[in-house]
Amino acid sequence: MIAKFYLLLLITLVLLTSCINTKKITYFNDLEKATGTASANRLQALQVQPGDILQITITTIDKDISLILNPAAVNSSHVSPDGMDAGYIVDSTGYINLPMIGKVYVKNKTTTEINDIITQELNKTIRNPYVSTRIANFRISVLGDVARPGSYRVSGERASVLDALSMAGDMNITALRNDIMIIREVNGEKTYASLNLNNGQTLASPYYYLHNNDVIYVKPGPNKQFNTSKIVQLLPAAIGILSLITTIVIVSVK
């Protein structure tokens, strides 16, 4: 009787484990057997906004002129509030102030467009200048039901929602994957969007690729309070132990 009890308990646990709906915790489960690029979203170049910090490097044949045009290399005044990012802060009106050029309007411009604008201005007085611009303070924040919530720095100008979740150690098993909130500021106004990471159409969303200072909020699921993740993690070990006990009992009875 004891052996039958443990055997029945083992079968019940196996059935419960097999009933776990893995589709709810799988990203883009509708694309498992799909191929192609029809649902992909073309990456849009980032547009500079007030408060951004631009790292602008200008190279010329004359080293002395290059030093004048790159004061951030020798002047500590071009440092962001966190003390890490050197560059030119875009003011509230969308301008930066460059040596030998003066004010340059950069709001809603891409870094490529800014390179062209500065190069055109320098060509009036300098021969063959080379200009390279990047956003130095590209950061995103990931909050909610993830392994490591926090603020993360992006080294380049490309980061997707999946990149952000990867930086944060991925979502916990209890997190809602069909309602990821993206909070974005555009022209001084907050905008919100919900992404369903169970649906491949999310790849075509304009919020799939992130902008500077975007906030990703991962909502906890209804089972979060019961700490379901721990239970699921312990199920394989529990089944193994019960299997061993069942085997021992059956052998002992025989």
Image (spheres, helix red, strand yellow):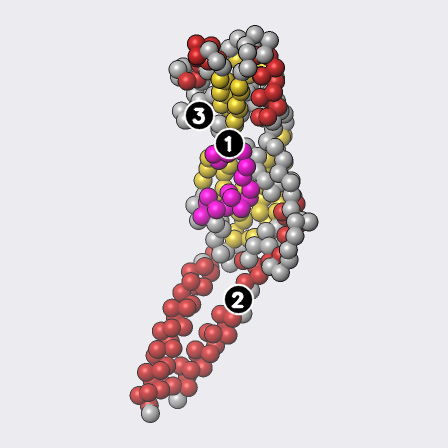
Q: Name the mark nearer the viewer: 3 or 2.
A: 3
Please, what secondary structure does the residue beneath circle 2 have?
Answer: loop
Q: Residue at x 40, y 73 (%)?
A: 239
Q: How far apart are labels 3 and 2 at the CA level?
A: 46 Å
Name the amino acid type tagged 1: Phe
Who comes first in sequence, dot 1 or dot 2? Answer: 2
Q: Residue at x 42, y 67 (%)?
A: 235
113 versus 30 height, above or below: above
Residue 138, numbered circle: 1
Q: Residue at x 43, y 78 (%)?
A: 10
Q: Nearer the viewer, residue 56 or 5?
A: 56
Q: Name the mark nearer the viewer: 1 or 2.
A: 1
Where residue 237 sits, quadrant-wise, is bottom left
225 versus 207 height, above or below: below
Q: Determine the residue located farthest toward the bottom in the rendered image.
A: 254
Q: Quadrant of the N terminus?
A: bottom left
Q: Nearer the viewer, residue 37 or 123?
A: 123
